[in-house]
Amino acid sequence: MESIHNRAGISSIDRDYIENKYHRQDQPFNPYDRLNYHGYEYDPSTGLNDQQMQEGLEALYNQTIGMDHALAKAKGFAYVLDHARIDISPHDYFFGFYNWARPLGKTFINKWNREVFDTMPEVTRVMQEYNASGTAELWLDTEHVVPYWVDIMQLGFPGLLERTRRYHAENTSLTETQEAFYSSIEIEYEAILRLLERLAEFADAHPGEKSELIADSLRNIKNGPPQNTYEALLVMYTYHVCAEYVDQFQVRSLGNGLDRSLYQFYKNDLASGRFTQEDIRSFLSYFMLQYSSVGNYWGQPFYLCGTDFDETTDISELTLLILDVYDSLDLYNPKIQVKIDYNTNRAITRRVLDMIRRGHSSFVFCCIPGITKSLMSCYGVTEEEARNCDISGCNEMHIRGKEACMISALPNAAKALTYVFTNGIDTVTGKQIGLQTGDVAEFHTFDEFYEAFLTQFRYILDTIMDTARAYEKYVSVINPSIMLSATVERSLQQAVDAYGFGLKYPTSSLLLCSFATTVDSILAVKELVFEKKLTTLSQLQIALQHNWEGYEDLRAAALNAEQKYGSGNSTADLYAAAFYRWFSTYVTGQKNSRGSVYKVGVPSTRHFITQGMQTEATPDGRKMGEECSKNVAPVIGMERGGVTAMMRSALNLQPWLFSEAYVLDMMLHPSAVSGEEGLDAMMGLMDMYMKNDGISIQFNVFSADMLRDAQLHPDKYKNLQVRVSGWSVLWNSMSHEEQDAYIKRAESIGG
């Protein structure tokens, strides 16, 4: 192996190559459209360009019309892997795959999607109206999948194939669909093995410092399971490339705990002398840089740590090595979830908190006591399943190897509140989307107003779930989960698509958006109209219709109302908890159309911005188009009682009621976390949060002065990271309006 003399274990030349591997750094880049870019050109003799690939797949699609979709997709998958351009570079330990823009989506899956939805015009209408109005975001979710990495690592690609063949041979009375299920897996995994051999042959033909190791390792994982740390990383990378970019199922965790999945390989490598710790440091650097360079806006997740059911902690020297490599590379993508428990080594927690206060905002802590209570309370999950769950995507909690949770929708509670003032008319689209709950001027009590809001939101939730039930049951028709199904033995036993129906818990979820904006708006009506009588519902209705223009004094009263969630106000905490529990109780346990139930979560992803743009003025003083609150955090500027009061308000909600995901965002001033005393203070917050059943928590450490300077002098802050929702971005990639929102929040926390 080449000698590399730096802490990260990668040369500057190699890092520069990888950072330009997926898109050129000297060209404009849109992270939302990351798949439609290329980095360096590949040798044309190795395969087709994108247009040629599209043409070949179109012809293949026409040949497969009428064929079972799983079988047709598998043929398309094999065509892509057999004809894709490839590369092995002397600057990289991981291969290049050129045609990574989800070519099957354009040629197979999107057409099947249209075919299904064309038979459901009413469902399509509701989805379009809800999405266009900001009432809710509905879509067919195949983006939150974690394969069962335990079996992938133990069996490898050939072992998964052989297991499929065994179940195929044992089941002698198969329907046409079941036959296609097994055959499709065999076709895809045979194609993966051919790809590995093709890559190995390319490495043989292009000798270099890394090529011999690469070629040998590619052939090893073609013929059996991984035998060392590098081969394990190569298997993860290969699975990710094939699943996410070809099979079109995002891989939302690398390993069932990256340190857990790699640790035995790591120990064996050091004991046998196969690799040194410096070698493994280097492999980890090259591995993590792949995902950083892809530039997925939402980040590529993996998690660390955890505690087994027998209370054995999943922390090792490899955990520290991964953190050290990540720190030295100065990355914000991949993003890392850290599972902690009461017996978690406090040195690990302090290490991560120190990284956060130094600018690594790409961490979220996930607390096992709260997770266990949450999952066990929802849908019959055992304690062992709950404690050993995977953290998927941003901070979702899914039972390892047994759950496929589809995010059905992100309902916007603030939108339901606006419908009370418009009698259900959506002023963005001009359509009757909400219910006709009556003229708000005719409400004589706060209870009437509050009941109208719950009626509007209940109607939205019912419509969402009915709509999702209509199309989610067709997920295996629209996009069969072929690669995933091979990793799920229960799916193989039943000959049923894993993501559709083959896992033990085929759940669905609703993620609540604009929570604090809604609570503060309800309380503004209560305080300003019915308690202080500063206005009437009719006058407030007119003020909202005019976007507060001409009603500045009333808006100031709304913004400065006493009853604000997150400020330590007891009335606000009472109503926040009541609404939170009402939502959870109403949705949790309702049946979906895949044989399981609905769960609830509160991560608002980026919808606090996008839905805010579509949400009319609200009674809390917010104007049309301004962002709504995110996750379970207070409205910007309402943390009046400090971070401790804010955390108490959030914990008063009983986080365990949200069994899909619950996350609290905290912004801390640098002066509050400096030195050992500052680190102790952060640890104190973590202890308070975990002891009160908190689930996930994430931090930004900023001062308003620093952010204002960063806005004025972006060149000085090229590496400044910001935790947005369930991921981090660079400050300089944010819009001016988004930056202003963070400056405002930083101003509210003071020094």
Image (spheres, rainbow, N blue to C red):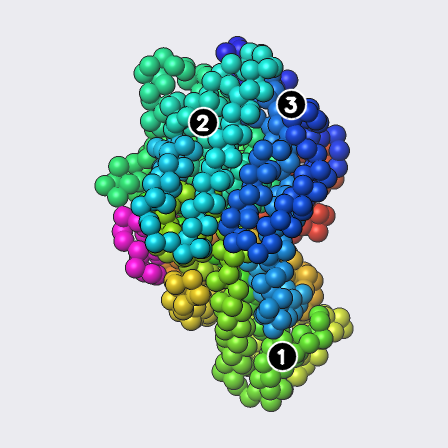
Determine whether 487 is above or below 120 in the image: above
x, y percent for residue 497: 43, 52
| Quadrant housing residue 560 | bottom right
Mark found first going from the N terminus, 1 or 3: 3
Can residue 21 be seen here? The reply is no
Residues drawn in magenta: 367-386
x, y percent for residue 551: 72, 73
Question: Looking at the rendered structure, which numbered label has been put on residue 17?
Answer: 3
383 part of magenta stretch: yes
Residue positioned 54% across, 81% down in the render: 452
Question: Looking at the rendered structure, which numbered label has been put on residue 512?
Answer: none
Residue positioned 55% across, 43% down in the render: 75
x, y percent for residue 96: 60, 28
| Quadrant housing residue 626 | bottom right
Determine whether 219 is above or below 626 in the image: above
Q: What's the distance in space between the residues labelled 1 and 2, CA to CA?
A: 59 Å
Q: Secondary structure under badge 1?
A: loop
Mark found first going from the N terminus, 3 or 2: 3
Q: Secondary structure under badge 3?
A: helix
444 part of magenta stretch: no
In the image, 544 versus 75, the foreground residue is 75
Contact between labelled residues 3 and 1, with CB atoms less than 8 Å apart: no
Question: Looking at the rendered structure, which numbered label has been put on residue 222?
Answer: 2
Main secondary-structure element of the magenta-colored stretch: helix
| Quarter of the C terminus within the rendering | top right
Amino acid at dot 2: Lys
Q: Which residue is tagged 1? A: 424
